[in-house]
Image (cartoon, grey):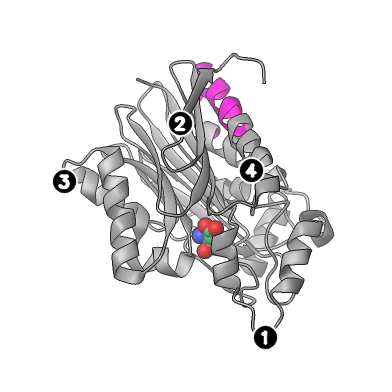
Amino acid sequence: MLPVVVVHGGAGQIPKQRTEQSTLGVCTAVRAAYTILRGGGSSMDAVVEAVTQMEDNPSFNAGHGSVLNAKGGVEMDAIVMEGKTLGSGAVSAVRNIANPVQLARLVMDKTSHACLTAEGASQFARAMGVPEVPEESLITEYSRMRWTKNLAPEANPVECQMGKMGTVGAVAVDSEGNIACATSTGGMLNKMEGRVGDTPCIGSGGYADNNVGAVSTTGHGEAIMKVTLARLILFHMEQGHSVEAASDLGLAYMKSRVAALGGVVTVDPRGHWAARFSSRQMSWAAAQKDTLHYGLYTGEHFTQSIDHPH
Ligand code: ASP
């Protein structure tokens, strides 16, 4: 069953004209990650590669294509975690870098801390030689249009975002049985400056433990944090539930307890995997045994050979 990688491109409802790009984006990211795994690479390298590709893809709310905060700026959150040592790294409210997931990995690898925020994260990025990029290069016409639309006093940005999400994440198990997760986001549309969501919070935006499995989440961050969604799902797996049942239990609890929708990708140490969501849609893709799996609507599940030309 090993290796395996599963990615998501955000839970919500994707506007019709963007569904194709979103599906293509998750499939391309999962192929790149699977190539690493098939070559004997680590699950951490695989999830960082998948998330980097989606950060670079303007179809998703992460890196280039991030939503804007109330002041029209881009502040991004990201996390990585590896299941062997339970080591993790995160950045929150970071600006002017193309790939927050890579900075999160540097926090894990090069510091004794688990999370760096805002200006301190930028200083660390500079010290590590991560190039600074102009804010403009992270902003798309689409994200600016949605920002302007939600400045109106009667606007409801949370509802609007539940309409169109795009946070990205990945979980993987490599051929040595090591498990990893990564999640990256621009956050919630028109959020207050300085707002930090679930994504960089360990156990909420993601969690990985070689003994249990890994989860990467997407949805309304304030709700995900209330139920620590990633860790809640792993708790259900510890109780003997399958990846699929545990994911559904976690999402159902979030829906009944705090009235929020979301989505997750989940793996266990044997390579069982799931992509589950309570929102209308979540673009997702998985690769295992040289087969590519993908879908967008509830119950949708397409497969093709991973080597099939796309
Ligand atoms: N969870 C992200 C946040 O609240 C948003 C999302 O998943 O789309 O920052």
Q: Which residue is mark 1?
A: 153
Q: Position of residue 170 (x, y in %)?
A: 50, 40
Q: Is residue 249 above or below residue 304?
A: below
Tell me which residue sits at (40%, 65%) in the image: 260
Horizontal and vertical percent for residue 179?
A: 39, 35
Note whether 79 is above or below 171 in the view shown. below
Q: Earlier in the sequence, mark 1 or mark 2?
A: 1
The residue tagged with tag 4: helix, strand or loop?
A: helix
> CA–CA distance between discs 1 and 4?
29 Å
Nearest the eye: 31 or 284: 284
Q: Which residue is mark 3?
A: 239
Q: Position of residue 109 (x, y in %)?
A: 52, 45
Evaluate if marks 4 and 3 touch, with contact meaning CB atoms under 8 Å apart: no
Residue at far bottom of view: 153
**The magenta stretch spans which residues?**
29-45
Question: 10 Å neighbourhood of mark 4: few (<14), some, or many (≥20)?
Answer: some
The single residue placed furthest to the left in the displayed view is 239
Judge the density around disc 1: few (<14), some (14-19), many (≥20) Cα neighbours within 10 Å: few
Q: Which mark is residue 92?
A: none
Q: Is residue 152 above or below residue 302?
A: below
Quarter of the rendering containing residue 83: top left
Amino acid type assigned to the residue bearing label 3 in the image: Gln
Q: Indicate the amino acid at tag 2.
A: His
Q: Which residue is mark 2?
A: 301
Residue at label 4? 19
Distance, label 1 to label 2, CA atoms, is: 40 Å
Mark 3 CB near ligand 1 (8 Å cut): no
CA distance for labels 2 and 3: 27 Å
Q: CA distance from mark 1 to mark 3?
A: 46 Å
Helix, strand or loop at label 1? It is: loop
